[in-house]
């Protein structure tokens, strides 16, 4: 991959652009917290060629939500489960909305 290819991927939410240190700094948390949510299987960071953890923007949003719950007093394991369920619900709602659009094109009357 060339430098030009890497710059083009910076807009990709799934591109693992952030080191563990930078991710912890951005989330105002510790590297230990990131390791803990990894152990709880909330997120699985990719690894660089040297074996260092790398995080995407999507993973940082997930980690930020878990941090919000933990800061509110939720145990980390429960926070991870809540975030997973929230993510699954959001995906199911997106699929449902797409299905609804596909089966009810604009201008077509819907049955009541």
Image (cartoon, rainbow, N blue to C red):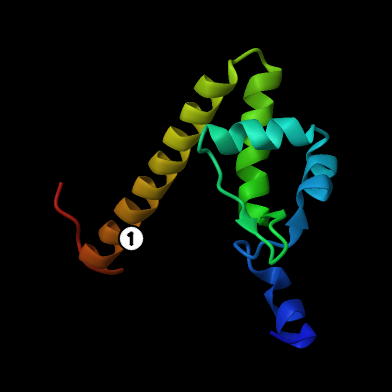
Q: Is residue 21 above or below residue 103?
A: above
**Residue at (73%, 31%) from the top-left corner?**
32
Residues 15 and 72: in front is: 15
Q: Is residue 3 left or right of residue 58?
A: right
Residues 84 and 91: in front is: 84
Q: Is residue 29 left or right of residue 79?
A: right
**Residue at (64%, 68%) from the top-left corner?**
12
- The residue furthest left is 111
Quadrant of res 17:
bottom right
User: How many numbered marks does the figure carry?
Assistant: 1
Quadrant of res 73:
top right
Q: Position of residue 111 (x, y in %)?
A: 14, 52
**Mark 1: secondary structure:** helix
Residues 48 and 94: in front is: 48
**Residue at (73%, 62%) from the top-left corner?**
50
Q: Is residue 27 above or below residue 67?
A: below
What is the quadrant of the N terminus in the image?
Answer: bottom right
Q: Position of residue 35 (x, y in %)?
A: 66, 36
**Residue at (31%, 68%) from the top-left corner?**
106
Q: Sort mark 1 into few (<14), some (14-19) or many (20+) by Cα contacts within 10 Å.
A: few
Residue for badge 1: 98
Q: Position of residue 71 (x, y in %)?
A: 71, 19
Q: Position of residue 34 (x, y in %)?
A: 69, 37
């Amino acid at each position: 991959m060339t430098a030009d290819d890497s710059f083009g991927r910076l807009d990709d939410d799934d591109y693992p652009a952030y080191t563990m240190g930078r991710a912890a700094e951005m989330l105002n948390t510790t590297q230990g917290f990131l390791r803990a949510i990894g152990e709880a299987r909330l997120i699985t960071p990719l690894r660089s060629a040297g074996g260092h953890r790398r995080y995407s923007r999507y993973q940082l949003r997930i980690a930020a939500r878990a941090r919000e719950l933990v800061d509110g007093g939720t145990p980390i394991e429960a926070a991870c489960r809540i975030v997973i369920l929230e993510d699954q619900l959001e995906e199911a709602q997106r699929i449902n909305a797409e299905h609804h659009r596909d089966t009810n094109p604009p201008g077509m009357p819907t049955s009541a």
